[in-house]
Structures are given as structure tokens and as C-alpha cells.
Amino acid sequence: MPKEKTSKTSPRTGATRTRSRKSVIQRGEVAEFFRKRTQLVGFSMELHKHTQYVAEFSDNSLDAIETYYWKQIRKDKTKAGQPIILPGPPKEVPYSRLPPPPTKIGKGSWTASTISARVKRLVAPIRNLINHEPVMLINLQELEKPDILPDEVDGRNLQMYSFEALDTGIGMTRRDLQQFGLYLASSKSQQLRQTRGSQGFGASSAFSDAQNTTGRPIIVATRYPSERQGHVSVFFTTGKNQKEYVLTETKAPLSFTHGTYLQLFYLNIQYRRSYADEYIRQTSFLNSHVNIIFIDPYGKIHLYPRRVSEFVKEPSYAMPHPTSTSIGDFQDQIRDTKHTRLEDFLLKSYCRMSQKRAERIIKSAKMPKGVKRLRIGTRPKRLTLDQIKALYASFIAEKYYAPPTETVVPVGEEVIRKTLKEIFKAEFVEATSRPPTSSKGLAFAVEVAAVYDPDLSSQSGAGVLFRFVNRTPKLRDNSDCAIWKAAASVNWRAYKVDAGANRLPTGPFRLFANVAGPFVHLIFKAQSKQALAEDDILIRELKLGFEEVGRKLRRHIAQVLQRRERARRADTLLRYSRKVAQSIIAIQKSDTTISQKQLTQLPQRLEAIIIKQAGVKPSDDIDQPSGGPEEGEVTAE
């Protein structure tokens, strides 16, 4: 029989010693987890995958462009606080020549000079605009797939695509370039303000998917405004959240003075229109301060020139509000704080926190028996768990003002109205911006717009309602979103608009809703960031916005119907006007006080009176009633 393993007892202490065993619980890396599960953030083999690539990097580009212009205005202290006014929009964006596809894809093409030459060819059609205008360019091309890559997945054929994104944004320094593409590496995650992205997952997940499906590296070229040359880099990201370089950061001349260029390769099913191109089209609706160019795999160039001169206002950084802070957040903030006094921690970590309130919170914290009371000078990192719990109870018991609303920057009614009028050329375009408000300590603002024209194509559902969050369109998870549910809760028939089975408007009608705010990402339902969670105040604000544009639309439709009715009556009167004039002439021709000239002009004067009273232009083709005189035959004789 095998010998049974026994425990040994120490002769000195009497303690039992056991042989240490290897732990069965292993700690993984965030990067390793998401590299194997890129579908969690939208990179699954489907048509929306093309859209996801476009969405992730267009968000990055637009944020970078805005950051560049905000930084430029901050340099000029005489313009501090003033709106940024750009020169008049360009008459055209002259991008009519397709860039050639990458001819060589391999180690020999991943050099600084080759990458610089590729950037030069890409921006050649807009070289006169590239350093003077906010520009975002995305080029998506289908390439010949190497034999080593799979041909199909789940019975669907796969193609290889080259994805290129270029912007005239702030660019990156060499140190930033070293961090770019790593999970949770973000310029927006520490100090929060209203931006499109903040979590550091989008580009990283895109890089993982590109490498997983094609085995090819990521190519980046970037230039920071104060630097004489740009930097290019070619790399792989790893499951350890590190980079393996094919080409380390190398100085190179670039065809723009500031901005970023990126290229990667990925596999997906065949590209189809009305997905990625529709995303770009909708992006142009609320980002009319930027020139947007999108080239699809079929070679069609989608141009959306800048439409407004006033640039987006820079939002303020947002501090957490006490009512939006959970016990877990509170504990983490105490552990991570650099403040050495408890009073300073409260004052400088939260908005709407005064010195008197901070002192009151500390003094009111009721400690369990035997636990030392807190003082304003207590070091936060020395707090015990019992002290933190008592402090938090006192912290949430206070009544606070709503969070400041200067951290919220809406698009603006005038900009939305002007842009939608130019795009749709509709007879009715209205927009409303609700005053900024807050819910659960999160400040936000709601903007709603409506477009109506009988010549618009009749649509329903997602064809009618366009959802945006911080200017970013949301194309999926429609019915699961708070915006959709708020629109469905409105009685649209009360506003003379037909509604479908899903209770959304139908017909030649378009609705737009944008929710803006620095903490909006906290109320998304999932990591894919496609649907906002339901919140009573958010739903209420959206519904009030929809109802306001609904009332304006009802007035417009009523006025249109009234004008049509007046025009119909005028047409009827005009059909009989010459017959009436003939009868009047017959009655009055014996009256010597009326001149022959007056009688001759009577038909024309009668028509003019009818048209003036109707206030509309009658139909051009007016049939005379049978038995009346022909045109030109009415005389006084």
C-alpha cells in the first residue's frame, strides 16, 4: 500500500506544517480576456463589424480634432472664453480621385519612408485643405485574401479589408504613441468631460480583432503640433497588454502638420451598403463643424463638407457628484487619493462640496463603539473599514445642489436646424434644446429635432428615429434604448402624425434625439454602448423634447392644411370669376356713372381680389364652368 502523507508538527511551536500546494486560481490579464472576446464590444463576423471599425476610429478622430482647436484657442489668452469661429465653410471638398490600394503588404512595406509615401498619396486630393481645415478621412478597401486565411465562417464567405483613418487632430507625442492601443490606456479616463469615448477599449479591441483575423500588425503615423517631424510605428499588441514592434517609433516627414494616420487589416463577411456608410452619414448630421470623407470598398466617395463656422465649445472637466458615488467608488477614491487631509479629500474630489459641508460630514460621522472619531486633518489612507462606512453614511445623508451644468455642451438649436435644412431641404425643420438637468448626480442635456416634408420617403421605426449620444449615432439595439422608449411613449396622433404598431411616427417624417453629458457613458446598458438605460428623468426630458417639436409640427401641418383649403376655395372662385364678372357687367352696363374702362378691367380686378384674400397662389390651370365666356371674350359690349 502507498504511504499516506502525514502532517508534521513543529517541536517548538506545536504548529502543524503542511506542504504548500500550487494555487488552482490564476490571475488573467484584461488584454488577454478581451483579445479572445472581441465580440463583446461589437467585433463579431457580421455586417455591423464594418460599422464598428468606422465608429471606433471616427470617434477618436473627432475627439482629437476638437482637442486640437480647443488647445489653439487656449494659447491665445485674448480669446479665452470666446467661441471658436472658423473661416467660412469650403465651397467643396475636392476628393474625386480614389487612392490606390496598398500594392505591397509585408515586412518590406513597413518602413518609415513607405508609410510616409502612403500618407502623401492619401491626402494628395485635399493637400490645400489638410493643414487649414478640420478633416476626417476613412478609406475602406477590399484586398485579395492570402491563401493562409480562412475562406468562410458559418457558411459565409470572408474577405480581407484594409482600413485607413486619417485626421487633422491633436496628434500624439512619442510617449503617447507608445501607449496608444493598449487596453485601458486613454487620454479621457482620468479626468472626465463630455467626449465620445472614455474607457480605452475601442481601439484596443479593434487592434486585437485585426491581429486575430489576419495576423498583420497595426501601422500608425502621427505628428504633434509643436514637433517638426512626425513619428511612425508598426506593432502588434499582446495578451500581456504590451507591444511587440515591427518598427519602433521612428521620426518621419508627414504630409500634415498635426494629426494621426492609422492602417490595419481585418477579415469580415462581404461589405454591404447602408451600414458603415449610413453611420458616417448620420455622424455628419451633428458634427457639421468637420469635413468628413468616407471611401467605401466599392470605390464610392461620400463627401460631407463642413457646414458651419462656429466650432464646438470646449466642455469643462466634471468632478463626481456625491449622489452618484457608490460605497465602492468612495472606498476606491479614498485608497487612491493623494490628499493627506480628510477635509481636502472631500473638497477636491467632489463637486457641490463646500468647506462647511465637508466639516459637517466629518463631525457627523457616527463611529461604532471603540472606533476612533474622525478629524478634518485625519489622513484618508489610514481610515479603517468601519471609519469609511461611517463617513460614507454621513456623506450620503447630506442634501446637495444638482451638479453644475457647464460640463454639458449641447450641439445647439441653430446649428441643428441649419444643418438639417441643408441636408434634407424640407419644408419643416425644427429643433429644441432642453435646459441641462441631472439624475442620480449625472448632468446631461437632451436635444430633439424633427424634419417633415411630403416629398420625403415614407419610413417607420429606425428609418424615422435617429438616436445620438454625445453627437455619436447609435444604429443597433433600437427598441432597448431609453430614447426609443421615450419616443414610443408620445401620442403622435395628437400631433397629426401617423404612428405604427411600435407607436413610433410613420410617413415623410424624421426625428432626431441627442443626449449630451460627461457621464452619459455610465448609463449605457452594455459595453457595446448602443443603448441608454432607462431613467425616469432622462425619459421625461426626452418626452418633453419630442412633445415640443410635435407641437411645432402640428402648427405647421395645420397651417399647410389651411393654406391648401384657401387655395382650393380660391380655385373654385376663380373658375366662376369670369362668369360673375359677365353678370355684373350685364347688370351695370346701363349705369352711366361707370366708365367703359372700369367695366373692362372688372374680371382682372375680381381675380386679383380673390388671390389677395386667399393669400396663396391658385392653380395655374383653372377650368371655366361650362356656358361661360372663353378667355379674352369678357367685354363690356
Image (cartoon, rainbow, N blue to C red):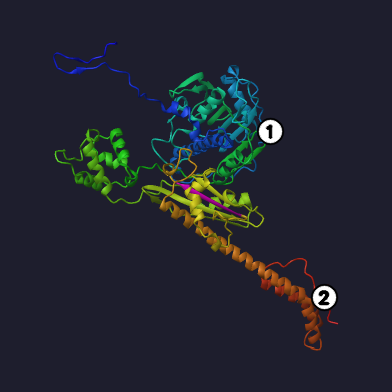
Element marked by disc 2: loop
User: Residue 423: horizontal and vertical position, in percent?
Assistant: 62, 49
**Which dot marks residue 97?**
1
Residue in the picture at 54% in, 27% down: 210
Q: How crowded is mark 2: few (under 14 residues within 10 Å), some or many (20 or more)?
A: few
Asked if one can make out residue 225 in the rendered structure from this viewpoint, the answer is no
Q: Nearer the viewer, mark 2 or mark 1?
A: 2
In the displayed structure, would residue 599 be above or below residue 524?
below
Q: Which residue is drawn at 18% across and 42% down?
A: 367
Principal SS element in the magenta part? strand
Figure quadrant of residue 146: top right
Q: Give the range drawn in magenta.
A: 509-516
Quarter location, residue 606: bottom right
Q: If the image is split into quadrants, where does the C terminus sit? A: bottom right
The reply, left or right, for residue 48 in relation to residue 8 is right
Q: Which of 113 and 149 is in front in this view?
A: 149
Tell me where residue 505 appears, x and y as whole percent: 57, 56
Residue 380 in the image: x percent, y percent? Answer: 24, 35
The three-letter code of the residue at mark 1 reads: Arg
Residue 227 is at least partly visible in this image: yes
Cα gap from disc 2 to disc 1, whole angstroms: 63 Å
User: How many numbered tags mark residues here?
Assistant: 2
In front here: 298 or 87? 298
Return the residue nearer the eye: 66 or 543.
Answer: 543
Q: In this view, does 320 lie to the left or right of 274?
A: left
Chain-order first, disc 2 or disc 1:
1
Membership of 511 in magenta stretch? yes
- Please give the label number shown on residue 626: 2
The label on residue 447 is none
What x and y, as percent, mark residue 286?
54, 46
Q: Which amino acid does label 2 sit on?
A: Ser
